[in-house]
Amino acid sequence: MTSIDGLASIFPQQRFVRDAAFQAAFESDGLTAFRAKPLAVVIPESNEEVIAAVRWCHDHGVPFVARGSGTSLSGGSLPVADGIVIALNRLNRIIDLDPHERIAVVEPGVVNQHVSNAAGPHGLYYAPDPSSQSICTIGGNVAFNSGGAHCLKYGMTSNHVIGCKAVLATGEVVTFGGRSVESVGPDFTGLFVGSEGLFGVALEITLRLLPKPEMFHTVLVGYDSLQAAGDAVSAVIDSGLLPGALEIMDALSIEAAEAAVACGYPPGAAAVLIVELEGPREKIAYERERLDQLLVQTNPFAQRVAVDEADRLSIWKGRKSAFSAVGRLSPDFLVQDGVVPRKRLGEALVRIQQLSQQAGIRVANVFHAGDGNLHPLIMFDGKQEGALHRAEELAAKLLRLCIEMGGSITGEHGVGMEKRDFLPEMFDAPTVELMDRLRRAFDPKLIANPGKMFPGKEAPALSSVGLHPLEKAGVISRE
Amino acid sequence: MTSIDGLASIFPQQRFVRDAAFQAAFESDGLTAFRAKPLAVVIPESNEEVIAAVRWCHDHGVPFVARGSGTSLSGGSLPVADGIVIALNRLNRIIDLDPHERIAVVEPGVVNQHVSNAAGPHGLYYAPDPSSQSICTIGGNVAFNSGGAHCLKYGMTSNHVIGCKAVLATGEVVTFGGRSVESVGPDFTGLFVGSEGLFGVALEITLRLLPKPEMFHTVLVGYDSLQAAGDAVSAVIDSGLLPGALEIMDALSIEAAEAAVACGYPPGAAAVLIVELEGPREKIAYERERLDQLLVQTNPFAQRVAVDEADRLSIWKGRKSAFSAVGRLSPDFLVQDGVVPRKRLGEALVRIQQLSQQAGIRVANVFHAGDGNLHPLIMFDGKQEGALHRAEELAAKLLRLCIEMGGSITGEHGVGMEKRDFLPEMFDAPTVELMDRLRRAFDPKLIANPGKMFPGKEAPALSSVGLHPLEKAGVISRE
């Protein structure tokens, strides 16, 4: 253990942590079913310390995982057993915010919501809005190309990151993109976004900011069936309207949200649809008329229009709390993140219901309907023998269903540890082989977040499932 | 020369061309100052033939350049001397067009404009609009991440390509992305887009289609000075309006366009600004009011609003013909493609004027002002001893100015052969080193379009500058 002294010497004692109690907070992430014990946690406060830590890992062939708030739902920020965790939360400065160029340059530990908070006084905001935006960090958003309810209109994280300075797993420091959307050659920035920590660590990230919409028009619509809600989504998209968000929740997730936050959704709904228009006042006045005409033909049995911002937020509260609310219905659950072609949404929902019934496992459904991104929540009790395993078997069937329907195994959570075995089912052998070659161009020693994204042999230990370890430790809390 | 028989055996005689007269049409591209003589031109009619040709090149270590209409302005589709040209123009099928999913799957030889033509009856169109869109092909657009006047609002080609099947330089066939914007892991599709033919050849490209704007509002504004036009651009952007296009032409390019197409721009203008709003009728009604209020404060001396579609096209005609029109003022010219931060546009224009005067070389300016993308047209007479060389020296100064101001050496034309020596000035050594490693992951033998993008030793022969060889041959014609 003399070798780790070199790493320790880079950091003051209190920012090089091997204390078991403290480390416990880093043993798991949003995929609470798994945990692994790192060798040490380092907490850099500057780019130079991150670079030095990565170079030490490279020189000594020690794996590392960079991590923000650890909200990954795919196990993407799980530590590697006997590797280093580089906790980036203290690299939380907004280095530059230029309202004229509409960009912000931020460190990786900046919380997503804080970018919009800082941009707000200039009439700007940062568009990608994961449900965890009040705690998740931009570094993590970059690693997993995170999405959110409003990505239907504005695209994923990769559509909003225009430049990136990063330290590669080799210790080299590179700079991609810049302050303009126009860049030279291949989209290296876009390659880095979504690389799940396998290429290196982002040090400075340049984000596009958008003008805040002048107004919102938010409608909550109740339906007798999931199918009817799905058909309404098709009708909206086919009309040429492009809402900021188009979300569906099924009966089970409504029940959970109602129990958790009393969101006041229409009682007895088999599904609710949230449609949110956003933009200049005159445009919304016109679009809401078209939307009204259209929705009336979809046979809703209840409809509620947000009358003010507070009302709007109360509609969103049910949706945004859905994941944690499901915890009230079931001690444990797995969140899936499959994508199906939008026009096959109704068909996919029927198949999911069948698979759920066959397995005798309850599945709640919450989804970004506009882009066909499903979030089935598979409920189980981790204390029951084999329950996690059965839940995972059902999850696998749902993923294969998405592949079979021409969709994807992940819309926004990433492959991570959770879905790594499905990568070769999603892509053919030459494509996976090329991905591996590209990865090795960044990380020849395979020390950056190994065991994620690509099929791997070593699986981390099963954890006592339940609360996120940072929640247990009181470090983070959710809305 | 026995070895080339293997390649010849893949193609019927008339599609394996070594005839000098025919080959002449392929010796050059839109950067007419250079030419190179290929070993042979092959004209595949199927994916299988492209794959077989690439595999033959890989097996025999023979370089190849894939090519559509050869409109590259950076010499990106120049042949490699004694290499193979793979002419993709016959791979021009629109394989699938799905109005519900709003996507088109096309072969690489499909002409840009033809995608919109096919999508038109469904109320859809393909947004990226290079000036050469009536002849350039989607394969070339993908290779160079092409832009156009309307990319201010809608982004470049990479924002509209969501999937790609390609044959790598190794002969492997890979598939990236798919029919949804949500994809797995790093943006491999985005990496391929803009790779300038150095990674392989696209075989099938999946494009996003957008709903056609309900209406346009196109304004032509005349100013006394370039500075005033530049300030107007800042005022528009700062107001929060996001026009579809925001273009400036200076006095010299106006003069050229006037002589060529009699576009009727305001006489005596030092600069004209074209602003085009687009969208639903009600939105435009509202936005044009804001735009009017705003423009009145920018001290224009003339203003013309397009009264109908014919009038709109006549305004655009001047802008779209500017490049070729400059040919009336000068026997030859080099088109540059630098980017500066939008807020430094005025400063950049003053510096370009100074550099032009110092060099005693006339420079016309046409640019996508909204995103800081300059197109200086450097005029010279190729028949004068050393004139091309002096023009290139001025071009180099303009590129260095863009780098120095925090911009980029290319906005949409690509690095190609023309700007390859500037890549190491734009990026630091570790970044270029990584780019090279990534390139070798696709093309370990360096046979795919070698000599482009990265600094290279071998330069092609200087050509008799002038008309595009395909124009000379009567194969293509421009608006």
Image: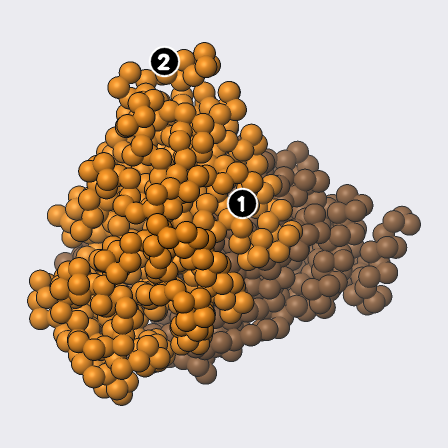
Chain colours: A brown, B orange
Percent x, y of residue A475: 66, 68
Q: Are both tags, 1 and 2, on one chain? A: yes
At label 1, counting other C-alpha atoms closer than 10 Å, the crowd grade (few under 14, some 14-19, many 20 or more) is many
Looking at the image, which residue is at 44% across and 33% down?
B80
Q: Secondary structure at mark 1?
A: loop
Amino acid type, residue under disc 1 in the picture? Phe
- Of the pair A177 and A414, the residue shown nearer to us: A177
Could you tell me residue A151's position as x and y percent?
Answer: 39, 59
Looking at marks 1 and 2 on the same chain, the residue that comes earlier in the sequence is marked by 2
Q: Residue at x 66, y 55 (%)?
A: A173
Q: Residue furthest right?
A: A2
Counting from the top left corner in percent of width and height, residue B257 is at: 21, 63
Confirm whether residue B471 shows in the render.
Answer: yes
Q: Nearer the viewer, residue B67 or B290?
A: B67
Q: In the image, what residue occupies the spot 65% across and 47% down?
A: A449
Residue B146 lies, with reference to residue B80, above or below; the image says below
Residue situated in front as seen by the camera: B370 or B205:
B370
| Labelled pair 1, 2 in contact (Cβ < 8 Å) | no
Please indicate whether residue A467 sits to the left or right of residue B66 in the image: right
Chain letter for mark 2: B
Measured Cα–Cα span from mark 1 to mark 2: 33 Å
Task: Please indicate whether residue B174 sits to the left or right of residue A25 in the image.
Answer: left
| Front position in the image: B20 or B475 | B20
Instruction: Name the chain under label 1.
Output: B
Residue B454 tag number: 1
Q: Quadrant of residue B282?
A: bottom left
Any part of residue B100 in sight: no
Mark 2 = which residue? B9
- Three-letter amino acid code of the residue under disc 2: Ser
